[in-house]
Image (cartoon, rainbow, N blue to C red):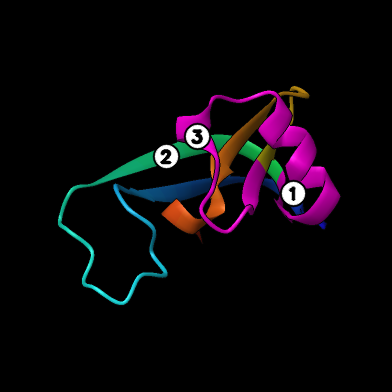
Amino acid sequence: MKQYFGKTVTVKVKVYNECKYQEKKLESKTKTIMYKNVIAFGVISGDEAKEIEKTTDRDNIDDCHEYMVLYFSDGTISTFRNSYVDLFII
């Protein structure tokens, strides 16, 4: 479901090297990426996730078949494996 921020915001996406839902402690290998001009985000699952998985390679399919999408003010989008990221509004 797409959630609008009501204004353009900067977000921080923390990307893990493994699924964040695993019981074992996540390794310290993470990457933090800042994105500007974000107007909305969404978490996609179910049939919409299956459509994403049809157009990606096997290595980029989410363990739980959930995807986080960032929507930018210029109309572009970025898609992430939701089980491997956390989103923070700055």
Give the position of the N terminus as an image quadrant. bottom right
Residue toward you, 72 or 43 = 43
User: Looking at the rendering, which quadrant does residue 74 occupy?
Assistant: top right
Residue 65 left/right relative to 39: left
Give the Cα distance between marks 2 and 3: 21 Å
Give the Cα distance between marks 3 and 1: 30 Å
Whole-percent x and y of residue 32? 32, 44
Q: Which residue is mark 1?
A: 7
- Which type of secondary structure does the marked residue at label 1 adopt? strand
On the question of residue 75 being in view, the answer is yes
Circle nearer the viewer, 1 or 2:
2
Circle nearer the viewer, 2 or 3:
3
Tell me the kind of residue under disc 3: Asn
Q: Which mark is residue 59?
A: none
Image: magenta residue range: 40-69
Asked whether residue 9 is drawn in magenta, I would say no
Whole-percent x and y of residue 84? 43, 53
Asked whether residue 45 is drawn in magenta, I would say yes
Q: Residues within 10 Å of mark 3 (few under 14, many from 20)?
A: few
Identify the residue at horizontal 50%, vertical 34% (top origin).
60
Identify the residue at horizontal 54%, vertical 47% (top origin).
62
Give the Cα distance between marks 1 and 2: 17 Å
Q: Which residue is mark 2?
A: 34
Q: Is residue 34 above or below residue 24?
A: above
Whichever of callouts 3 and 1 sits on the residue coming sooner in the sequence is: 1
Whichever of callouts 2 and 3 sits on the residue coming sooner in the sequence is: 2
Q: Which residue is mark 3?
A: 60
Whichever of callouts 1 and 2 sits on the residue coming sooner in the sequence is: 1
